[in-house]
Amino acid sequence: MKTIDEARLETDLDYRYEYLAEFIGFGPEDIAAIHSSIGHLAPMFPKMVDATYDKLLAYDATARHFVPRQHNYEGDVPETMADLSQTHEQIKFRKEHLSRYLMRLIGNAYDSKMVKYLDVVGKMHTPGAGNKSIDVPLVQMNALMGVLSDILTEMILQLDLDAKITTQMVRAFNKLMWIQNDLINRHYAAC
């Protein structure tokens, strides 16, 4: 039986990631499967991002977070949720962020720098650990991660790949999404 320093899991981000990766079984083969998806999934990012924002804008509980001015966005902001659409400039700005996030998932090394990035994704959505003006409830973040995971799975299953490669990609992204979800959830425990 392996001994885990549970207190360290809360204070040492790399230790936490290594524990999660080992426990879940997220290893070099999974990272290779994710990296191999770049040529297949990158062209599908616009469709994936649109599907994600279709869902986010379909519910007031998620859409309301896109009415206030977003960090670094300098254009016109919507006055109400009714003003939100896929073509609103602030939504386009947010969609670009999601596209860059997806590109980082499939294009970056899974090293300490990437682990810090995944952790920042969690921090930035909480007032207690991130930007004080952003307060996205945990249930909404879990909903986002669930729909994003499902969209990734759907896109992979639409690819014309060997069944073994498809299975490897789906499993690799599933493991990664669980790690990402933990690195989001941990910041809500701190609030």
Image: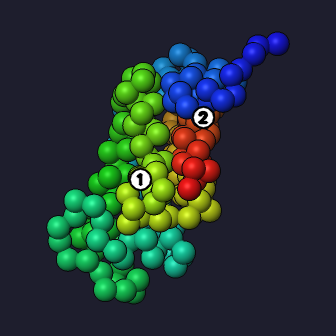
- Residue placed farthest to the top in the image? 1
Image position of 11 (left or right of 73)? right
Image position of 95 (left or right of 115)? left
Disc sitting over residue 27 in the figure: none
Q: Nearer the viewer, residue 69 or 54?
A: 69
Going by the numbered disc 1, the residue's amino acid type is Gly
For residue 90, which quarter of the picture?
Answer: bottom left
In this orientation, does residue 156 appear? yes
Residue at (38% x, 66% y) in the render: 133
Q: Which residue is mark 2?
A: 10
Q: Nearer the viewer, residue 107 or 138?
A: 138
For residue 11, above or below residue 133: above
For residue 153, which quarter of the picture?
Answer: top right
Calculate the distance from the C-alpha at mark 2 to the C-alpha at mark 1. 17 Å
Q: Secondary structure at mark 1?
A: loop
Q: Which residue is mark 1?
A: 130
For residue 157, above or below residue 168: below
- Residue placed farthest to the right in the image? 1
For residue 22, which quarter of the picture?
Answer: top right
In this orientation, does residue 168 appear? no
Mark 2, Cα crowd under 10 Å, few <14 / some 14-19 / many 20+, is few
Going by the numbered disc 2, the residue's amino acid type is Glu
Residue at (34% x, 74% y) in the render: 68
